[in-house]
Image (cartoon, rainbow, N blue to C red):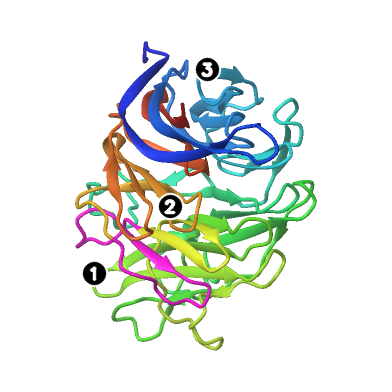
């Protein structure tokens, strides 16, 4: 357990503009944002963080761990959700709504900033949390040490009443083609328009072809991430499985132009085709025409790749990421500003949208999740209760 409340990371990584209250015209005041290692009060693995404001945030983790801060991460306290399931993802939207995934099949919802929580089970029909010995294809993990994930895996809420969640069942990692015994995509996508009271399963493509020697045969696929541009979308979702050395990946990148609109394979894929999709393991979409995705699954890559896609499906400019870095999470608080969090406590940042460079922090544990309220207010969480906070002043 960490013993210091706020160990300064010793380096500034962003400049922030605040405003004085002087009338009649406010004056711009530039302050410096720095990373701090926070005392979380737990050694449980933390998977994600989500914020209502820069000051009011939650962190979630193993065994029902729910932490909250009301002062910008300077102190954290335990809150109670009546479950011991792993709390895996959290998405928040103003004024006071947050949604927490409890794997494998439940979403906990609050509309009063955490004072009360309600459980919403979804019929995702999974037998457990993972398939032992099943790997997506990440060359950084030895065989058997990176099991494929099952159940609810991600959630995104463009507003307080509207959210999408994605889930995967064992068929999503089935290396056999879709047939009468394996009829579906292996994944599911769910929508609420009433603040989580009810969830409706959305229609998605039944399968995708691989990007290798598979002669147009369709395979199932997992959905591992979902991200909606603020307010009204569009929304994106993706995932992939490694079918085999010759077949390559069966990957999906799905797009819905707005909440409640139909999902389809990325623009540029003909409606009558299940063409090969880009390999993505996670993503964040800060604008209606911009999505940053991460590929951890190439067996030939030296770490992770970041790729930009636009609303028309075109790949954006080439992105540079440090070699050998495995990225576990990405957050983009502005169209050209993104942060990533990954193994060995490494956080990177771009302010151009094309070149990611490490920022110096005190973290050494693997980081699993990151969220940003603004370019100058972010939280990264990870193993052993690690919390890194970026804040001004």
Label 3, secondary structure: give it. loop
By secondary structure, the bulk of the magenta-drawn segment is best described as: loop
Write the residue at 46% across / 75% down.
Answer: 208
Mark pair 2, 1: CA separation: 36 Å
Q: As drawn, which residue projects farthest toward the top? A: 3
User: Would residue 169 be seen by someone viewing this image from the given angle?
Assistant: no
- Classed neighbour count for the residue bearing mark 3: other residues with Cα under 10 Å, few (<14), some (14–19), many (≥20): some
The reply to whether discs 3 and 1 touch (Cβ–Cβ < 8 Å) is no
* Magenta residue check for 33: no
Magenta span = 295-319
Q: Callout 2: helix, strand or loop?
A: loop
Q: What residue is drawn where x is 57% and y is 55%?
A: 166
Q: Which mark is residue 191?
A: none
Q: Quadrant of residue 300?
A: bottom left
Residue 307 in the magenta stretch? The answer is yes
Q: Earlier in the sequence, mark 3 or mark 1?
A: 3
Measured in 3D between alpha carbons, the distance from the residue under mark 2 to the one under mark 3, in whole angstroms, is: 27 Å
Observer able to see residue 84? yes
In front here: 32 or 166? 32
Name the residue beneath numbered marker 2.
337
**Number of numbered callouts drawn:** 3
* Mark 2 / mark 3, whichever is N-terminal: 3
Q: Residues within 10 Å of mark 2 (few under 14, many from 20)?
A: some
Q: Please state the horizontal and vertical placement of residue 229, each as a whole percent of the image.
A: 59, 59
Mark 1, Cα crowd under 10 Å, few <14 / some 14-19 / many 20+, is: few
Q: Which residue is mark 1?
A: 245
Residue 348 vertical position relative to residue 236 in the rendered view, above or below? above
Where residue 43 appears, x then y in whole percent?
Answer: 41, 20
């Amino acid at each position: 357990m960490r013993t210091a409340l706020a160990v300064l990371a010793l380096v500034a990584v962003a400049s922030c503009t605040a405003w004085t209250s002087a009338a009649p015209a406010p004056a711009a005041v530039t302050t410096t944002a720095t990373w701090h290692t926070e005392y979380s009060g737990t050694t449980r693995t933390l998977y994600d963080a989500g914020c209502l404001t820069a000051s009011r945030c939650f962190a979630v983790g193993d065994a029902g761990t729910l932490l909250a801060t009301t002062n910008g991460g300077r102190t954290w306290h335990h809150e109670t959700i009546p479950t011991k399931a792993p709390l895996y993802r959290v998405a928040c939207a103003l004024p006071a709504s947050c949604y927490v995934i409890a794997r494998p099949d439940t979403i906990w919802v609050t509309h009063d900033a955490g004072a009360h929580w309600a459980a919403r089970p979804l019929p995702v029909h999974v037998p457990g949390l993972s398939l032992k010995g099943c790997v997506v294809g990440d060359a950084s993990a030895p065989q058997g040490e990176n099991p494929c994930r099952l159940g609810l895996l991600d959630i995104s809420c463009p507003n307080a009443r509207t959210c999408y969640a994605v889930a995967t069942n064992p068929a999503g990692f089935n290396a056999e083609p879709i047939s009468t015994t394996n009829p579906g995509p292996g994944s599911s996508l769910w929508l609420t328009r009433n603040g989580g009271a009810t969830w409706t399963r959305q229609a998605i493509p039944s399968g995708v072809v691989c990007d290798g020697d598979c002669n147009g045969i369709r395979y199932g696929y997992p959905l591992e991430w979902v991200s909606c541009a603020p307010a009204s979308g569009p929304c994106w979702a993706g995932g992939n499985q490694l079918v085999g050395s010759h077949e390559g990946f069966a990957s999906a990148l799905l797009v819905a132009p707005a909440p409640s609109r139909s999902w389809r394979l990325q623009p540029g894929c003909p409606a009558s085709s299940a063409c090969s999709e880009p390999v993505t393991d996670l993503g964040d979409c800060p604008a209606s025409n911009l999505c940053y995705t991460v590929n951890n699954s190439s067996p030939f890559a030296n770490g992770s790749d970041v790729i930009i896609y636009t609303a028309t499906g075109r790949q954006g400019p080439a992105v540079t990421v440090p070699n050998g870095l495995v990225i576990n999470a990405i957050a983009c608080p502005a169209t050209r500003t993104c942060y990533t969090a990954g193994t060995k406590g490494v956080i990177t940042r771009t302010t151009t949208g094309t070149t990611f460079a490490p920022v110096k922090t005190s973290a050494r544990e693997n980081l699993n999740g990151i969220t940003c309220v603004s370019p100058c207010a972010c939280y990264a969480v990870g193993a052993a209760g690690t919390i890194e906070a970026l804040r001004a002043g």
